[in-house]
Amino acid sequence: MSIQPEVRRSNVRACIENISAYHGPEDPEYLAKRLGRPVESIIKLDANENPYGPSPLVQEMLSTYNGYSVYPDADQRSARTALAEYAGVSEDTLILGNGADELIDLLMRAYLDPGDELVDFPPSFAMYAFNAQLQDARVVSVPRNDDFSIDVDAALAAITDRTKLILLTSPNNPTGTVMPTADVRRILDTGYLVVLDEAYFEFANADGQGFETMIGEVASYPNLVVLRTFSKWAGLAGLRIGYGVFPHEVGQHIWKLKPPFNVNVAALVAMRAALSDKAHLMETVDKIVAERNRLLAELPRTGLVRPYPTRSNFILCEIDGMDGRTLTNRLADEGILVRHYGTPRLQSCVRISVGRPEQNDVVLATLTRIASELRG
């Protein structure tokens, strides 16, 4: 008779054992099966994806490329050369990541020791705080103002001798808020490392309201990193490719941590194709911005939600008569996916990504019907 070994307690790090898993958007195939509907009928507006998809050139180049058996260039040389012209920066400052998420994680791993502090401005992208907690760092939260702008004085007061990173976002997810350049500069002038996430840059830059990117100023600020992505404007979310512009001292540390083949060949081919068809992609960006503006005008007329101003490809909405989880579940039963948040400030909100006109029409009609049912 064999004796079973004693089960020992896991030696996993305490900060990993105590953290809650990050849960992303709903799977449309899973929802389609639950509803007994074809997946093509699901309206997926919960992840800020481009509803028009990538450039047709992406599919063409992916299908004809014959180098998939070879590892990608670990130094990303040709990719950085192609990207530098689009981004308007020196290729020496660029590092590509498996999505901008990977670059956020690498920055946290490079700069946060246990007990160090990350300054965050909720509501914002949840992965900032999540990745900091993976390093057993302390997240110092500076809540946003009622209009979701950042209180710069409060931000400066939150900085301590344990501060290592300050995370800013413009436009901000999930609020769509743009941060004035003057406010970014005030925080940069502290000398602490600032990471500015411009993942939704193309939508703010194309809406005619003017947008001052900071990407060209990394050369002037040794404590500024700017992140962007191809997931949103270029429709490459499923291929995972983002990039950052890094000052030399910061970049050299990220290169040490970056896995050698972190961006796969298919993603690099798709990125080159997207850059070759920028005019087509900017046409889709313009369509999304036009639909965003239409939704901002039409959503209040549903009698159920009140949209906040936004400069991105999504709209945060305050709900009248129910909480965000309830409305999200109700819309899911109708085959519509939107995003809700469990944080107290956003419990009565949902975030709706901008879809195609016909998808947005269904959303507006469904919200109007739900509002009518609530009124009895």
Image (tube, grey):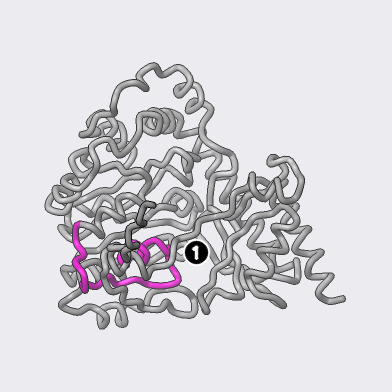
Q: Quadrant of residue 132?
A: bottom left
Badge 1 density bin: few <14, some 14–19, many ≥20, Cα 10 Å: many
Task: Identify which residue, 344 or 203, lies in the foreground.
Answer: 344
Instruction: Please say whether residue 215 is one of the residues in the magenta stretch.
Output: no
User: How far across and how far down the image is residue 373, in percent?
Assistant: 84, 70
Q: Residue at x 44, y 48 (%)?
A: 202
Q: Quadrant of residue 121?
A: bottom left
Q: Secondary structure at mark 1?
A: loop
Q: Does residue 77 appear in this view? A: yes
Left or right of 145 on screen, residue 223: left
Q: Quadrant of residue 226?
A: bottom left
Q: Residue at x 30, y 39 (%)?
A: 262
Residue hosting label 1:
174
Left or right of 86 on screen, residue 314: right
Left or right of 113 on screen, residue 326: right
Task: Identify which residue, 4 or 105, lies in the foreground.
Answer: 4
Q: Does residue 234 appear in this view? A: no
User: How far across and how far down the image is residue 89, in percent?
Assistant: 25, 43
- Please report the bounds of the magenta region as a residue range: 110-133
Q: Residue at x 19, y 79 (%)?
A: 160
Q: Quadrant of the C terminus?
A: bottom right
- At label 1, which amino acid type do we have? Pro
User: How far across and how far down the image is residue 19, in percent?
Assistant: 38, 68
Q: Give the residue at the far front of this rendering.
A: 1
Left or right of 102 on screen, residue 329: right
Q: Residue at x 70, y 46 (%)?
A: 33
User: How far across and how far down the image is residue 168, in percent?
Assistant: 34, 65
Task: Identify which residue, 310 or 44, lies in the foreground.
Answer: 44
